[in-house]
Image (cartoon, helix red, strand yellow):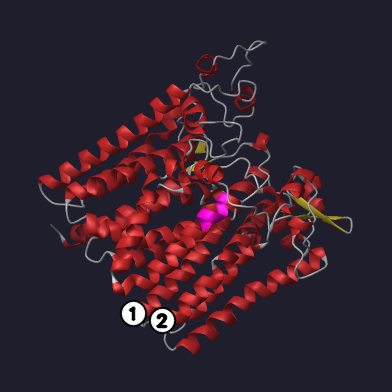
Amino acid sequence: MSALASRTLRLTRRLWFPAAIVLLYVYSFPYFEGIRSANELPRIYLTMAMVDRGAFDIGPELAAYQPTPDTSRYKGKLYSNKPPGSSLVAIPAYALLRRFEGSRPELRHLFHVLRLGGATIPSLLFLLLVWRLLRELIPQRLAVQRLVLAAYALGSMAFVYGTLLFAHQLAAALIGAAFIWIFLYARTRTGRLAPLWAGLCAGGAVLVDYQAAFVGPPLFLYLLFRARPRLRAAILFCAAAAIPLGFLLYYHHACFGSPFSTGYQHLTNPVFAQWTSRGFLGLESFSINRFGRLHFSPDDGLFYYSPFLILAIPGLWLMAKNRALRAEACFSGFVIVFFFYFIGALVLVSGWDVGPRYMIVALPFYLAPIAVLFREASKSWLRLAIPAGLVTASILTYLAIAAVFPYFPDNFSDPLFDVTWRFGAAGYVAYNLGWLTGLRGVASLVPYLLVAAAVVLLTLLGAHRGWRRIALTVSAIVVAALLLAGYREATRLRRLPVPQSFLPWMEQIWEPRHPAMRRAELFREIGYVPKHKPRHTR
């Protein structure tokens, strides 16, 4: 083999995995103008207002494009009711788009470009830090590192919200990065400015999503316990965190008259205002029913859609047994348990979403315990089979959701099958890169599915040697198939009706439209009989 061929082969072996992750993140572009994505529009409008007019109010942008209910009113002006962090991060992307399209870009182009700049690229950059964390926790086991990374990147809410401008994943990436910076600083004593970067990320997370503030105090205590010299680390952390937090207070004062007055205190939507005014910061007494639904139910369950995440619980126990990781176990365990309480006490209904999105900020703290569990389980292919199967099922679930319709309406009891399966099987899929090559419907997902299959299969095959690699791969696929088949059978036995008046509206606003869409098959599957002649699909 020539030297050039040898270098090419080594480079391919090193880069195929990150290249595949990047491709899967950018492959689908879910855009449905008819749903008027209420969570994304005000963030887009704020970015435009800051760049075009040097202002924070979004009234002119609302008038020029689509209305949205997610607004606040103060002294006669309309503002986004969200914190401004994600809009700030998206500024470079919008400035670049504006240079090519002028002062009035097309709405779909705004969605596409600002999602890339404000969510996808930061999410991919965060995965580099996750990779560094996994190298510390699972040394010398490249395939197992890849398996855990793929689980988080492709098999959790991080994947869906890493491609949408919802801010939750950006906040999770920032607060997760803060933790990893501190962890690496404490473990390796390298990177003298690591506490500064951690503080900047932690403050930035609150600027993006207020929920990240719940993680800040325990993160600072973790820093004090682990970092040396302690005083220097604390000063760097606090000084850096004060920069984004100071801007957030300035933004509140400029928009709502006080540094401590947020958009949620001036909502224009009376229903939203009623929800946020209940309890303390929208929190009431803990409800076991709410907790159970948001963790285990088919409509919004965290562990239903990402069953591998439940492995963090035994993983915490394994971490606590290791004295070197006991501080990380306490910190990660606190965040996980706190968000168990948080989601069980939260009044606010999250609307159209995939999974309990208010828990996304906690997901990075599942990584360390899961990594430790996989490190121990990987010593035997048999012990690794079930965890690997749960990862495989999680990845298949989220890949399908992202490719079809990643906005589950809140009036579905089982949206994975009622929305993803029914619409996807009938040829209804989101815009994607396959569309650019002339492929339509399910056929447009063939490259996407092939890349995903390569990620799963090659990662599983690399986790062991000889016959054990085959045994592990087959066992993981069987476990995933049995789990998903069990989901389907449970859905059939429940026999809950689908909202028949709602599904036809979804079909009507679907984009893109093409001849491969089997409208009659979709309606027959849900038992809906149109009252008028179906319109021609173009």
Question: Foreground mark, 2 or 1?
Answer: 1
Up the image or down, 504 lies above or below 214; here it is above
Image position, residue 149 (x, y; %): 36, 56
Depth check: give the residue in front, 120 or 224. 224
The circle on residue 191 is 2
Query: Mark 1: which secondary structure?
Result: helix
CB-based contact (under 8 Å), mark 2 and mark 1: yes
Q: Which residue is mark 1?
A: 188
Give the amino acid type for the residue marked by disc 1 in the picture.
Thr
Residue 159 seen by the camera: yes
Give the amino acid type for the residue marked by disc 2 in the picture.
Gly
Disc 1 crowd, CA 10 A, few/some/many (<14, 14-19, 20+): few
Range shown magenta: 339-344
Residue 201 falls in image quadrant: bottom right
Image position, residue 476 (x, y; %): 25, 41
* Mark-to-mark CA distance, 2 and 1: 8 Å
- Asked whether, in this view, residue 274 is left or right of residue 487, the answer is right
Up the image or down, 447 lies above or below 253; here it is above
Image position, residue 313 (x, y; %): 37, 55
Is residue 340 highlighted in magenta? Answer: yes
Residue 123 seen by the camera: no
Q: Residue at x 40, y 73 (%)?
A: 183
